[in-house]
Amino acid sequence: MDIASRPSETPENPQTADAAPPPQAPLIIRRQDYLPPAWLVPEIALDFALGLDATHVTAKLNVRRNPDGNGASVLRLNGDQLAPVAVRIDGQAVNDWRLDGPDLLLDLPGEAHQVTIETQLNPAANSQLMGLYASHGMLCTQCEAEGFRRITFFPDRPDVLSTYRVRMSGDKAAFPILLSNGNCEATGEGPDGTHWAEWYDPWPKPCYLFALVAGDLVANHDSFTTRSGREVALNIWVRKGDEGRTQHAMDSLKHSFRWDEEAFGREYDLDLFNVVAVSDFNMGAMENKGLNVFNTRYVLADPDTATDGDYDAIEGVIGHEYFHNWSGNRVTCRDWFQLSLKEGFTVLRDQMFSADMGSPAVKRIEDVRVLRAAQFPEDSGPLAHPIRPDSYQEISNFYTATVYNKGAEVIRMMRTMAGPERFRAGTDLYFDRHDGEAATCEDFVKAIEDGAKLDLTQFRRWYSQAGTPQVSIVADHRDDTLVLNMTQVVPATLNHGGEGQPEKQPVPIPLKLALFDRETGTHRGEQLIVLDQAEQRFVFEGHSRPPIVSINRGFSAPVAIEFERPAKDLVFLAAKDDDAFARYEAMQSLVVRHLIAVVGGNLDERARNAERGAIAEAFGAVLFDPTLDDLMRGELLILPAEGYLAEQFLVADPAAIHAEREALKAWLGDAMKDDWQDLHDRVSAAPYSRDAAARGARKLKTQALAYLAAGAPAEAKTRAIVQYRKADNMTDRQGALMVLAGLDGAEREEALADFHARYAGNALVIDKWFSLQAGSLHPKVLEHVRQLAEHPDFTMNNPNRVRALYMAFAVNAKGFHAASGEGYKIIGDLIRRLDPINPQTAARFVPSLGRWRRIEPKRAAQMRAELERIAAEPSLSRDVLEQVTKSLG
Ligand code: ARG
Ligand code: ZN
């Protein structure tokens, strides 16, 4: 039996009464078991005596019995690797506290008490980077999801909301800047070169939004005046020397403030907004109230060190964290099963923001590419879960592409069905109704239902069912009528939450559609149809010729579509569709179909050449279409990712997919060699600027090089080293180095050595140096990765560096899926070595091995063996154990 399917150990579950689970059984937390807290904590005062390897914390909790609780007199305070130094109730020291595992239990006789707890921490020894930790001499916190319990004992659950008063003191030279949530109310000097600051946040919040930062930081200061006239001081805090690379983040922040007022009617609610960049960080960034903490990679940028992609990511993440101030902070989550309430909604908001700041068409294509590369495989693998999961062992494992990106798609569908105005009425109602509350996904759906006047009864299945719906379409044209016969299947997920979801119900699938007349090349307008049955016919009259069907325009639904049609229809759509996404999709389909057929050995030489010809024709149309801008042209020329191609097979051979995809690339590189060279010449003439035309030119510059590298490597090498040497920006330099890293020769060595020397000491750029080599097409990539792991610049203690080397490698099919199994061993060894240091980051590598069931048998056995080797480790973290057991189960 799946280890994860054992009954829950929570006292609410009657099944555990007689049969105690074996001692090693994981604790499974279930959504159904939610109970309101027995005690509330309306106020907390925290006092920190700061030191890098010794910080003393005094927490004063004003606790009050919850009228809606179960009336228990025992107060449970969560802890994690904490021991209480002192406990006082209403000022009196007590000794009759008890520990239940990591938690502290206190019996409280009355309705309200003051509980004081002292704890002692060693931030420098905190390699997990959860709770209070040290990074380059500064102190900072990460509390979401359950890090606050590593600072003090507390009801660490998002439905306990408190106002926070925070006092901190420490050495003034080591920590000249002292920050927490809310406003700074007082500062002063203490004895022996210390100083202190007192902060107060008037907005009640759950403890996962608490933050503290102390260090030697400098800021980019600016301000923003809100629409009602509030002047907000904006500060972006970084280490000395980095301040020159904060302007893009500041601009993005001001744009975010303005955009949320205009697009969602949301205004900021404090006089101060601080952002701090930290180089040791498990995730992207964190939306702590009034004090966002960011991974440096989502703050620091200048043209010499950051690519255009880095700039876009900064804008998106700055927006994301800022938008959480309403979708997450003012309205928070009742429990962690509701995570998509804030994350799915906030991802949608950041996607809409980035679309408005740049090209909506390009942004939509990029978002779909991410969804298909990361979320589709998750949804069809052993870790599949609904956007609102039903159970978990370690909540950190549920910060997933499903909760975030599919969550955003689900809310986007509501918007598509309601239209923008009615959707806005729904979100207005949601914010009004639940401001100050800890809400559920159901509350969100109900508010959209009431505010946007939509019936979402059946739509709620999108929240409870895992799996990507598979839609099949068969077109039938007779006389002047087109009939689209559609079916939908939501695939069974057998492992979800341990119980699985063997049977699924149909979901409403909103599909935007246009029917092109194949002679005039026009259509009569876009329509929205909703497929909500298992089988359904849609009839369209008045088409004397069989129209060309453009469907799921704008990717209106996150589904997979199977629709057999002639290549010439796809070539038409790739060249002529007026919906940018549909155009991209036609291009992708053309290539995907072709590669499926060649990998399956289903094409003879003649058929293969004919299909390649059709693809080249579509590429030519894209290259020479004067109506396209270069950013969009770049999207249309990207081949489908290997991961997405693998998804098309029940059991995939990653080596064959890689080889055939490279073969097509080489054929296009060779057959269209002159076009790529002309293109490279044209775009190389554009001077550096951050405008769309120049960014488009840079995107194409490296793409042209990559096709040439596959089809005409000598030509590519010459051009790449020139591009590298002449580069006046990181986009060109990294692009050239990426191409060179995959080719042998003196140029490769010259560029890699130059890059390393030029950017020595710049951690974010050295990360790129690791990634480019680990992700390269070089035949010796395995050897390179092993050597890079021994490089003096490599460390297991910095998550960015670990990801730079090993994530880049885990998605590099050439190395990771090497026939010897060496690639799997590299990732398996990494997980085992990293787990004791940083379990959260270690667990993120498990899914790459966990896909073994969908891989050809020889490699599947090697991947499984690697998972078993990890499972055999004596003391795995809960994070890795959950992912490994579910992947094996
Ligand atoms: N809420 C953060 C965000 O903006 C992510 C924090 C995740 N933290 C974690 N330990 N898993 O998406
Ligand atoms: Zn978020």
Image: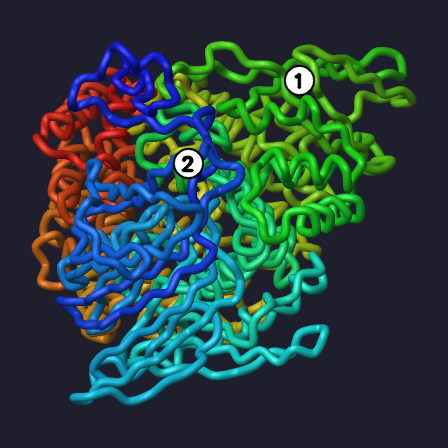
Label 2 vs label 1, nearer the camera: 1
Q: Residue at x 22, y 60 (%)?
A: 118
Mark 1: amino acid: Ile
In the image, is residue 599 above or below residue 790? above
Q: Position of residue 463 (x, y in %)?
A: 56, 29
Whether disc 2's CB lies below 8 Å from ligand 1 is answered: no
Looking at the image, the residue that sits furthest to the right is 542
Mark 2 or 1 closer to N-term? 1
Label 2, on which residue? 664
Q: Is residue 817 left or right of residue 419?
A: left
Judged from the image, the secondary structure of the residue bearing numbered disc 1 is: strand
Residue 179 in which image quadrant: bottom left
Residue 798 in which image quadrant: bottom left
Query: How far apart are the two marked residues, 2 and 1, measured between alpha carbons?
Result: 28 Å
Residue 790 in which image quadrant: bottom left
Q: Kindly identify which numbered label has been placed on residue 14.
A: none
Label 1, on which residue? 473
